[in-house]
Each structure stands twice: as structure tokens, then as C-alpha cells.
Image (tube, coloured by chain):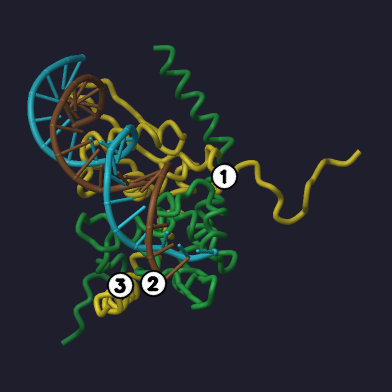
Chain colours: A yellow, B green, C cyan, D brown
Amino acid sequence: MTTTQPRPEEQDLPFNVFARACPSRSTLEHVTGRWGALTLGALSEGSLRFNELRRRVDGVSEKMLSQTLHALERDGLVHREAQLTNPPRVDYELTPLGREVAQRLLSLIRCVEDSMDTVLEARERYDAARGAR
Amino acid sequence: MTTTQPRPEEQDLPFNVFARACPSRSTLEHVTGRWGALTLGALSEGSLRFNELRRRVDGVSEKMLSQTLHALERDGLVHREAQLTNPPRVDYELTPLGREVAQRLLSLIRCVEDSMDTVLEARERYDAARGAR
DNA sequence: CAGCATCCAGCTTGATACTG
DNA sequence: CAGTATCAAGCTGGATGCTG
């Protein structure tokens, strides 16, 4: 007997973000959420401690960072390394999977950053065309 | 005198998502937001009408889709083509910039989808370790 | 079909205070 | 330092009804 391969190309993936109930949607949200994206971006350059992260991700509150890190850790994208010293020291770093995800995310982020001149022009045109009416 | 180049490598980009006030942050949010990401993903395969989009992006409300499309159009990522017929017909399609962004976004989405087995395992481990305590 | 305007429940978020 | 707990406020987003 042969293995059951639905279609050689564009096979039905088991996980599909476009479906409401698919768990991949929540992971994507953790990754792309306001703080998730910036946290992964910051960690992509190396491991950081809690308050280092807080300073890097401008505007994040203690609570949100904590919450974000928990979600990313739970999804296996971030590894938490705690030293039971006094004062305590906790380092956060990307897992191998986290690095893969972060790399693609950074590619997107850089693409957006590099496009901002165009975006800003588009916004002006849009607003001008609207304000006129 | 020479031109003022801060550093040859890793120059200070004019736009930086990590800074609270940078406009690139809002664009990134439009792109990666729950509905923004799925809308760009859906449009990456070709132009779609309003209600086609609504069906593709499972779970999006009329209001949210409308709002999302406006934001993406304003940022110059989506082009809106309206035909003044009766009944009206409006097609949405990606701009060249939108296609660049969508491509990177899709790369991220596929990466997440393909990683879901690992993610789900990580979640189980995390929950097990927590539930025990 | 392709939307816009309004209302409002509830989730998200930020501020503050406290713990180990 | 590295968080957790709590609470008020505001924004998000869904439902509904209406327009061209």
C-alpha cells in the first residue's frame, strides 16, 4: 500500500490560521501582538534579563511584559532561565523555534520600517483625498 | 568634508518600531493585527470582493473588516477598486508594497502553522509543570 | 452588494501597591 | 531584581439597524 498523500501541491495543512478555531491563530497572535513582536525582536539579538527587556521594549509595562513572556514561554518560543540568587537573576532567551519565528518576524519588521517613507506618503494622499470631501 | 555617515553597519534607521512614538509601530500593528494579518494573507492570492474576504477570514465582522481595509488602504498596502454599478462591486487587491509585506507575513504564518505540533507539545509541558504545583 | 452609524458588554491595559 | 495582585478606565469589537 502507498502512503495517503492528499495532494502533492498545496496539501491541506493540519493547521490553518484562517480557520477560527485553529490553535495556530492564538500562537500567531502571541507572536505578532504588540508586545510579543517587540519582545521576540529584542531577544533575537541575545538573551536579556527582565528589566533589560523592559527598557528595550519602549512603553511596555511590567505586567504586560510578564504576561507576554509567559505566553511565549508556554508556546515554546522563549526559554526562561532563573538563578535562585539574591538578588534574583532571570534570563530570557529564544529557543531554536523562537529563533526561526523571530527571524521571519524581523524580516517583516525591517520591511515595514524600510517602507515607512512610502507608507507616510500614502497616508497623506489618503487623508488629503478624504479631507477634501 | 565627507558625508555624515554614523556607522557603516547597523546604521541608525530613521524608523524604529522599538521606539514608542515611531509611526512604524502603528503600521506594524495594522499589518500584524488579528484581522490585518489574515486580510493581507487572503489578498495575497489575488484580488477579492468585500464579502469574499469576509468569508475567507473566518470570524471577522463586517465592521472589523471594513476598519481593517481602511487602515491597510491608508497605509498604501491595499488598493480599493470600486465600480459604480448596481449592485455595487468593490475589489480589493494588494499594492506592490502590500505584496512585499504580505510575502514576509505569509512566511511567518506558514512557519507558525508548521510549528504547531512543537508548540502544542510545549504548551502541554508548561501546563503540566504548572498544574503540578 | 458594500458598506456606515450607534450602542454597549467585556476584555485589555496601565497604575499602584505589595512579595520573595 | 523579578515579579504578582488588584482595580478602574478605556478601547475593542460584536450586534443591530439603516443607506446607496
Q: Give the residue type at disc 3.
A: Arg
Name the subunit of mark 2. B
Chain of the residue where label 1 is placed in the rendered structure = A
Residue A56 percent across, percent down from the top left: 23, 48
Q: Amino acid at mark 1?
A: Ala
Q: Are marks 1 and 3 on the same chain?
A: yes
x, y percent for residue A100: 49, 48
Q: Residue at x 56, y 66 (%)?
A: B48
Q: In the image as oriented, which residue stretches furthest toward the top?
A: B133
Q: Horizontal and vertical percent for residue A10?
A: 70, 55
- Residue drawn at the location 28% of the way across and 33% of the way down: A66
What chain letter is assigned to the residue under label 3? A
The answer to whether marks 3 and 2 mark residues whose Cβ atoms lie closer than 8 Å is: yes
Please say if the residues under marks 1 and 3 sit with CB atoms less than 8 Å apart: no
Could you say whether the residue bearing mark 2 is in a helix, strand or loop?
A: loop
Quadrant, the C terminus of chain A: bottom left
Would residue B18 appear left or right of B112 to someone viewing this image? left
**Is B24 left, or right, of D10 in this rendering?**
right
Distance between the Cα atoms at labels 3 and 2? 7 Å
Report the residue marked by disc 2.
B76
Q: In the image, which disc is placed on residue A123?
A: 3
The residue nearer to you, when weighing A80 against B129, is: B129
| Residue underneath mark 1 | A19
